[in-house]
Amino acid sequence: MADNGNNSNSNLIKIKEQFDFGPYPYFPLEQSPQHETESLFIHNLITPYYLKYKRLPPQDNLIILDAGCGSGYGALTLALANPNARIVGIDLSEKSIELARHRLHYHGIKNYEFHVLPIEEIGCLNYQFDYINCDEVIYLSDDPQVTLQKLAQVLKPQGIMRVNFHDQYQRAEQYRGQEFFEWLGLKKNNPEDQAIHTVRLIMQQLQDEVNLKKNCWQPALGNRLDRWGQEYILMNYLFQCDKGFTPLDVSHYLECAGLELIEMVYWRKWRLTELFTDPENVPAIIGAVEAIATPWERYYLRDLIHPHERLMDFWCGYPTTPQATILREESLIYLHPQLCTDVVKTAWRSTLEQGQAFPISHFLKTPAQSCFFQAEVSLDFVTASVLWPLLEMPMRFSQIKDRWLHLYPQDWSTSNPTDAKVITIKLQEILFMLEKYLYVLIVSNSYSNPI
């Protein structure tokens, strides 16, 4: 037992020293994620909360934890994506915490606090969190199961947690490279400029067909002599305590922590059927396995044949009864807040003025991306004109239907009055399609009947 404790303390010291040397991630202080739509979409609590509960989260008194906040760029993103929340950041590295405080102050964020603290001691802050972001951290833990349990203990009953693990299969050659450099003694003392220089020199002089160089080395980053190049080598070749996991490992850790999967952050990239040329018509045995396998078993099978993602990046929470989307006359329809921007509004208006379709997936790509292609999700001119007010405010389904009938009282193909029943069905199909990609959110109360 004493040895385990010593090893754990030794690893914490190594991790702390590494991130004191190079706070992660490296972004210039003045850089802001305010226009990084995809990142804001992921960091916005609305996204996973709606996936789990089919409603919007409370907007007041939210408390968000950035566990392992590093240099504070993620904390800044969380603050911009959730402007009414208090951001609490913790990290082992004093230098990282110092930089994180400076970063949020520089960008005018006021409601935050940072602490030099290991994740396993989070309970001492006496907070319960609405959202926990544990990004690029837990794979360094000596015992991810215990770390998850500690985080679960400070998560509110309806709270959401985002966690990610390094994928063992995708990163297999990288781990062999790390072992190689460890054997050379380059990881013995915590990172030094000389070790970084030596890794760069070795990688540059290896023959191009050597597996590690051919499959892992990115010369555009590795050959840089600035902070970006330094970070690339540290995080890939000299990374202390880096470990990989399988989807089945992660499933076990979640179960032991009393948590359940909500969804993968890049969910379409993890669909086994998306690896086939016709996802709607896969071989029968694949369909049969899909029908009985758990989500993590399906991710495991997908990972065996196409380990494409470096991170198993997902949202989780306490087990609840799955919620279905129900569309009622009084249902409120929201455009996802990460689409309610001046850039989207300008482009949307331009397509309406030109009588064209609006390619909504061009402005929020994450929900439409699979491993091999991005789905093209567009609003035809009529739909775009009907849904235009959603850029400013939510509308009830009945209001959207009335707007359609007002704008288009006649069926252009027959010149007959527009059939309200036909429009109701068509509008349902459109909204459910958009909701599948989270471009719209359909929020219903439980006191009225479905359409």
Image (cartoon, rainbow, N blue to C red):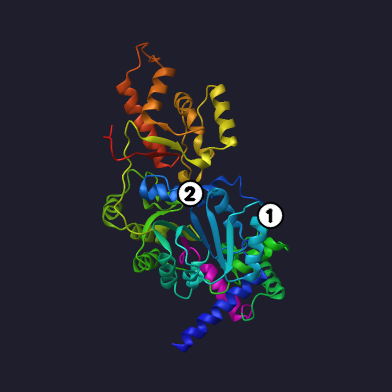
Q: Is residue 191 above or below residue 61?
A: below
- Residue occupying the point 55% across, 26% down: 351
Q: Which amino acid is tagged 1?
A: Tyr
Stretch of the chain drawn in magenta: 163-187
Residue sitting farthest toward the bottom: 2
Task: Specify whether residue 219 is in view.
Answer: no
Image quarter in which the N terminus is found:
bottom left
On the image, numbered disc 1 is attached to which residue? 106
Task: Specify whether residue 180 is in view.
Answer: yes
Rendering coords of residue 128 (x, y %): 44, 62
The label on residue 313 is: none
Q: Which amino acid is tagged 2?
A: Asp
On the image, numbered disc 2 is attached to which residue? 60
Q: Nearer the viewer, residue 248 or 185?
A: 248
Q: Quadrant of residue 154?
A: bottom left
Q: Nearer the viewer, residue 191 or 106?
A: 106
Element assignment for label 2: loop
Residue sitting farthest toward the top: 415
Q: Nearer the viewer, residue 4 or 102?
A: 102
Determine whether, in the image, residue 104 is placed left or right of residue 84: right
Residue neighbourhood size for the residue with mark 2, other residues' Cα within 10 Å, grouped as few (<14), some (14–19), many (≥20):
few
Q: CA distance from mark 2 to mark 1?
A: 24 Å
State if disc 1 and disc 2 touch (CB < 8 Å).
Answer: no
The stretch drawn in magenta includes residue 68 = no
Which numbered disc, 2 or 1, marks the residue that appears first in the sequence?
2
Q: Is residue 18 above or below residue 390?
A: below
Rendering coords of residue 330 (x, y %): 34, 32
Q: Is residue 262 above or below residue 14?
A: above
Element assignment for label 1: helix
Q: Is residue 265 above or below residue 223?
A: above
